[in-house]
Image (cartoon, rainbow, N blue to C red):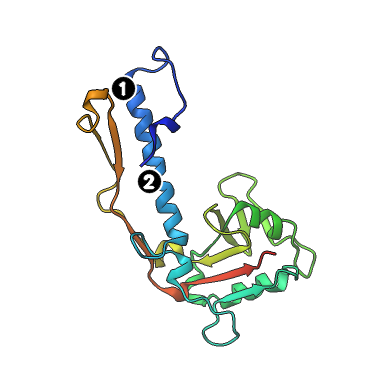
Amino acid sequence: HRDLHSFPPRRSSDLSFAAFESYLVDELTACVMELLDYALINGDGTGEGTGLESGITWVKTAGATQNEVEVAAASDLKYADVLSVVSLLKRGYAAGAKWAMNNKTLYTYFYGMVDDTNRPIFIADPKNESIGKIFGFDVVIDDNIADGKAYLGNFAKYYGYNMPEGIVIESSRESSFKKGVIDYRAMAIADCKPLVTEAFVRLHKKQS
């Protein structure tokens, strides 16, 4: 749901009714997709999909179940920490794996970081076909991810996402007929969940 008062005003001469409806469809669709994108990362499974945060038990203690490297707020994120995260991802899931993080995390911690031979670990894509790569894995930017967190995993194969009927846009004049108001609604039935939890690992640089 989105309040129509939040849309920028336009003069009737600037926009036909058909064009205005098309504009509303685009806006409402974008709102629904924003909610779904949020659930992919932060959904708790109650009234929404299960995201990476709650759908996986993150273990930072060294051992067979470790799937996270945590760096204290007072410590610097180092090349060895990133390398350790990559080493936690089992070989069978590395093909097709990608990094996911927000823009601030990428440019605060990864951009400019070098390995033991002084080579940058983040390689930007000069052709702009993608953001770039870290250790050969593509980087995906998602602002729904919290600062300091970076996931590495095979999202395409092992993260389930289903929206069987797409996004349905409906309008009604009944509820506000006397006022000449048209109500618009965008709805989607969707679900998401990590299918194989060991296909994902996480780097967590704690924030102060």
The crowding category of the residue bearing disc 1, from other C-alpha atoms within 10 Å (few below 14, some 14 to 19, many at least 20), is: few
Q: Residue at x 46, y 61 (%)?
A: 42
Q: Where does residue 75 sit, x and y in percent of width and height?
A: 75, 71
Q: Where does residue 5 sit, x and y in percent of width and height?
A: 42, 30
Q: CA distance from mark 2 to mark 1?
A: 21 Å
User: As drawn, is 201 to the left or to the right of 44?
Assistant: right
SS class, disc 2: helix
SS class, disc 1: helix
User: As drawn, is 118 to the left or to the right of 203?
Assistant: right
Q: Residue at x 62, y 75 (%)?
A: 69
User: As drawn, is 106 to the left or to the right of 155?
Assistant: right
Residue pushed farthest bottom?
A: 63
Q: Where does residue 24 sit, x and y in percent of width and height?
A: 36, 31
Q: Which mark is residue 52?
A: none
Q: Nearer the viewer, residue 103 or 199?
A: 103
Q: Nearer the viewer, residue 45 or 110?
A: 45
Amino acid type at image mark 1: Ala
Find disc 2 in the rendering and name its residue.
32
Image vertical order of residue 68 relative to residue 122, above or below:
below
Image vertical order of residue 17 relative to residue 98, above or below:
above
Q: Which mark is residue 18?
A: 1
Image vertical order of residue 3 relative to residue 34, above or below:
above
User: As drawn, is 88 to the left or to the right of 76?
Assistant: left
Q: Where does residue 89 sit, x and y in percent of width and height?
A: 54, 75
Residue pushed farthest right?
A: 118
Q: Residue at x 64, y 76 (%)?
A: 84
